[in-house]
Amino acid sequence: KAGVTQTPRYLIKTRGQQVTLSCSPISGHRSVSWYQQTPGQGLQFLFEYFSETQRNKGNFPGRFSGRQFSNSRSEMNVSTLELGDSALYLCASQSRTGGKTDTQYFGPGTRLTVL
Amino acid sequence: KQEVTQIPAALSVPEGENLVLNCSFTDSAIYNLQWFRQDPGKGLTSLLLIQSSQREQTSGRLNASLDKSSGRSTLYIAASQPGDSATYLCAVERGSTLGRLYFGRGTQLTVWP
């Protein structure tokens, strides 16, 4: 079974631009969560999508948004990029069978650098 | 608010030692707790998941215990090897926010030959 895939793996942008990151969960998994990892703040939760609906949201500004498609693939968008948005962005998938949670499986991440 | 703390922040040991990594959390109303491993610049690999009703889980040389009432978990690594060198992260999931993991800052482990 293929794991969680994220594209692109590396991205360089300049301040003020916007970016879209993509995540394909493990086949059959219906939940996708997004996290930001920085040396200063560690791993911080952005949001979680389950069955195309945002179920949870972390404490990030509205510049960070996401969506989930009917095939469970998810995208995350960051508008008006700031230097502080430079980070490793990780997505994770869960099966959420019967609405219950289990192991979250993480992708390799997208390394975003904002210049 | 759920806060997760991991001690120690870094650990350097010779090969063959048995290790204990500690994790504590402030809100005992957790749904489950997971231990992950992260290699430099890579994603997270799930090691063990303990449901709130369980006391421990084992996988090979790894054993994780959970004491919900005291807000603590330990990860025990037996007979450490250089390949175990990585950052180990503890994360809890709350029943009120399923799908959201609260992470500690991790323990950076170095096992030297």
Image (cartoon, rainbow, N blue to C red):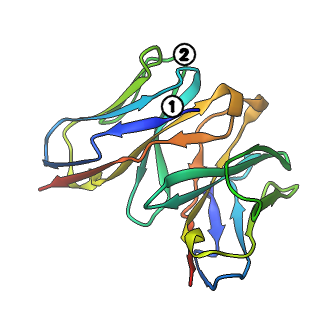
Q: How many marks?
A: 2
Residue at numbered disc 1:
B33
Q: Nearer the viewer, residue B49 or A3?
A: B49
The chain ID associated with circle 2 is B
- Under circle 1, the secondary element is strand
Mark 1 neighbour density, 10 Å: few (under 14) some (14–19) many (20 or more) = many
Residue B53's disc number = 2
Residue A22: name its quadrant: bottom right
Residue shown at 69%/55% (left/top)?
A: A25
Is residue A13 placed above or below B65 in the rendered structure?
A: below
Residue A60 screen position, x and y as percent: 68, 55
**Amino acid bearing label 2:** Ser
Residue A59 in percent (x, y) is at 67, 49
As helix, strand or loop, the secondary structure at mark 2 comes to loop
- Do labels 2 and 1 touch, CB within 8 Å? no
**Quick check: A38 above or below A43?**
below
Q: Which residue is painted at 80% across and 54% down in the image?
A: A72
Q: Could you say which disc has been placed on residue B94 in the image? A: none
> In x, y percent, where is residue B109?
26, 50
**Image location (x, y in percent) of residue B58:** 39, 29
Badge 2 density bin: few <14, some 14–19, many ≥20, Cα 10 Å: few
Residue drawn at (70%, 41%), measured in percent from left and top? A95
Specify which label sits upstream in the sequence, 2 or 1: 1
